[in-house]
Amino acid sequence: MSRSHRGDLAKLANEEFEWKKTTAFTVLKRLCERELFQNQNGIVTSLISKEEFYARHSETYVEETFGGSLPAFLAAFGARKKLTDKEIDEIQKIIESMRG
């Protein structure tokens, strides 16, 4: 879990995205409302790990784009990009671990 001062994050957002301080604070507020971050006395702390964020994002993408169907997502992905034998083996291991 990482911690940063709210002002430092606003400065970084200005440097990286050219956001005004008010824009950065609005985005931070929304992230806190979504329970991804918390702001206590100007110290912003992440409430979820990077891995959890990506897992949530992936679930939302599959839900919104493929009606929640992971097989439909994999079929679409595989139609454009040939999977290597190693990738197929890794996916198969994940599937097998989910069966148990």
Image (cartoon, helix red, strand yellow):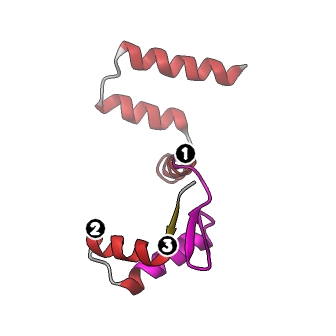
Q: What residue would you read off at disc 2?
A: 16
Front residue of 97/73: it is 97
Q: Residue at x 48, y 19 (%)?
A: 90
Q: Along the polypeptide, which appears first: circle 1 or circle 2?
A: 2
Secondary structure beneath disc 3?
Answer: strand
Q: Which residue is mark 1?
A: 55
The disc placed on residue 1 is none
- For mark 1, does the 10 Å Cα neighbourhood hold few (<14), some (14 to 19), or many (20 or more) residues? few
Q: Is residue 91 above or below residue 34?
A: above
Residue 14 painted magenta = no
Q: Earlier in the sequence, mark 3 or mark 1?
A: 3
Q: Nearer the viewer, mark 1 or mark 2?
A: 2
Q: Which residue is mark 3?
A: 5
The correct choice, above or below, for 68 with respect to 30 in the image is above
Q: Residues within 10 Å of mark 2 (few under 14, many from 20)?
A: few
The C terminus, quarter of image: top right
* Distance from Cα at disc 1 to Cα at disc 2: 25 Å
Of residues 47 and 62, the one drawn nearer to the viewer in this rendering: 47
Circle 1 sits in a helix, a strand or a loop, which is it? helix
Q: Look at 47% across and 14% down and name the residue there.
A: 89
Q: What residue appears at the point 55 percent right and 45 percent down from the top-left corner?
A: 55
Relative vertical location of residue 18 with respect to residue 35 in this rendering, above or below: below
Q: Is residue 77 left or right of residue 65?
A: left
The one nearer the camera, 37 or 55, is 37
Q: Are marks 3 and 1 in contact (CB under 8 Å)?
A: no
Instruction: Estimate the spatial distance between the alpha carbons at disc 3 and disc 1, rounded to whole Å.
Output: 26 Å
In magenta, the rendered stretch is: 24-50
Whole-angstrom CA distance, mark 3 to mark 2, is 17 Å
Residue 26 belongs to magenta span: yes
